[in-house]
Image (cartoon, rainbow, N blue to C red):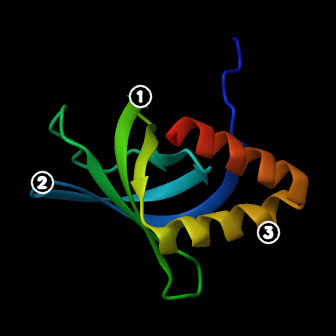
Amino acid sequence: MNERRQFIRIVYQALARVRQAQSHWSADVRDISLHGILLSMPEHWQPDDNAPFEVDVTLHDTEIHMTMVTELVAHDSHCLRMKIVNIDIDSISHLRRLIELNVGNDELLYRELALLADLAG
């Protein structure tokens, strides 16, 4: 299989709330990057195929939330793969710090931030 990932994904386990219109589900975060998030398959999953999702992740042992608008990229019976399409400044700051603490390489983090800026621009 040809690896197409451009962003480092870090394993991070946390609870996520997924919302779409009037529906909402609980899921577990499996991993996260500056560009996407992998979630466990929620129970009773029946999304509207075309609408975006709002994902709210609570960081462990804190009251810090990261809230992002996502699109479903792929799913199977075990997980949801979602692309982050919009994230507020506070949430991206928390996500950047989380990745920075887990990557341990500032140069690699700055390369990813530059890549993210290129994709947004």
Residue 43 x %, y %: 28, 50
Q: Which residue is mark 3?
A: 101
Q: In the rendered image of this protein, does residue 97 appear above or below residue 103?
A: below
Lower sequence index among marks 1 and 3: 1
Q: Nearer the viewer, residue 116 or 104?
A: 116
Residue type highlighted by circle 3: Leu
Lower sequence index among marks 2 and 1: 2
Residue type highlighted by circle 2: Ala
Q: Residue at x 51, y 41 (%)?
A: 120
Q: Is the N terminus in the top left, top right, bottom left or bottom right quadrant?
A: top right
Q: Which residue is mark 1?
A: 74
User: Residue 21: which numbered mark, if any?
Assistant: 2
Lower sequence index among marks 3 and 2: 2
Residue type highlighted by circle 1: Ala
**Does residue 63 appear to the left or right of 44 in the view shown?**
right
Q: Are marks 3 and 2 in contact (CB under 8 Å)?
A: no
Taking the view exactly as shown, the residue that stands out farthest to the top is 1
Q: In the rendered image of this protein, does residue 78 appear above or below residue 101?
A: above
- Badge 1, how many Cα within 10 Å: few under 14, some, many 20+? few
Residue 97 x %, y %: 70, 70
